[in-house]
Image (spheres, rainbow, N blue to C red):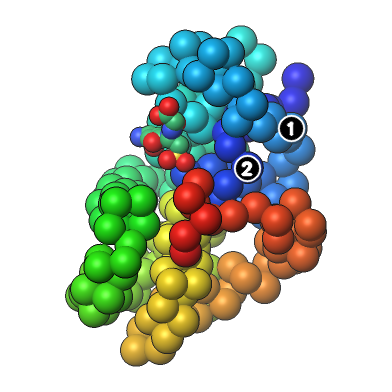
Amino acid sequence: GKYQLIYFNVRGRGEATRYLFKDNGIDYDEVNCRENWAKEWKSQMAFGQTPCLKDNDLSLVQSNAILRYLGRKHGLYGSNEEEAAYIDMITEGIEDLRVKYVTMIYKNYENGKEPYVADLPKQLLPFEKLVTKHGDDKSGFSVGNKRSFVDYALFDLLDINVVLAPNCLDDFPALSAFYKAILNRPGIAAYRETEAFKERTINGNGKQ
Ligand SMILES: N[C@@H](CCC(=O)N[C@@H](CS(=O)(=O)O)C(=O)NCC(=O)O)C(=O)O
């Protein structure tokens, strides 16, 4: 049957998967697990956390495992082992910056936003170099010459940082071109016009 994405009504760690579905014309159902989370849902999750992807009787948690699974299933994991390795490397780099971001958002927004933004150019520079070296920024490919799952993780990482610091990509031509290329993909553009997308907060505490 159809994929189910079980998550809260936030972008958070589910948005990259939503973008993957939308950009590749893959149908799926959203299941909001906020109601009765602790009583009904949490105990069903391998790590007591969400997002969770259900694919028939497969129940997969861990957002990056979900992206990799869909990458393997839908030809979105590079054209060879080297590209797959770079895709993994960038995915881990995105995870590192995402953790810095969510720690600031949830634990230290008032005092942590300014130093986080001041440090952002240093954090984004590796991605500028990697996309330039291994990808095609104008096409929105992080690695190689076709789409991969990491494109959606990188796009979401850039997007939430642009919301936080609107000029953060100004000194990064490759990341700016990459961001624009994905933003202009028909499936992504249409999705970002929907009420569902617009009403979804980026983070659970409403800070962004
Ligand atoms: N490493 C996990 C982290 C998942 C996680 O932290 N999920 C949070 C929600 S969110 O931070 O992603 O929005 C959660 O389940 N929180 C509820 C709980 O822990 O009971 C992943 O990448 O999926």
Pointer 2 residue: 9
Q: Is residue 110 left or right of residue 162?
A: left
Q: Quadrant of residue 70?
A: top right
SS label for mark 2: loop
Q: Quadrant of residue 62?
A: top left
The quarter of the rendered structure image containing the N terminus is top right
| Along the line of sight, the residue nearer the viewer: 48 or 16 | 48
**Amino acid type at image mark 2:** Asn
Within 10 Å of the Cα at label 1, are there few (<14), some (14-19), or many (20+) other Cα atoms? few
Q: Which mark is residue 29?
A: 1
- Look at the numbered disc 1 and say if its residue's Cβ is closer than 8 Å to ligand 1: no
Q: Where in the image, quadrant-wise, is ligand 1 located?
A: top left
Residue 162 visible? The answer is: yes
SS label for mark 1: strand
Q: Which callout, 1 or 2, points to the residue nearer the camera?
A: 2
Q: How many marks?
A: 2
Q: Measuring 24% from the left and 79% from the top, which residue is drawn there?
A: 118
CA gap, disc 1 and disc 2? 13 Å
Q: Indicate the position of residue 45 as horizontal and vertical percent values.
A: 47, 17
Q: Measuring 41% from the left and 78% from the top, which residue is drawn there?
A: 165
| Along the line of sight, the residue nearer the viewer: 183 or 43 | 43
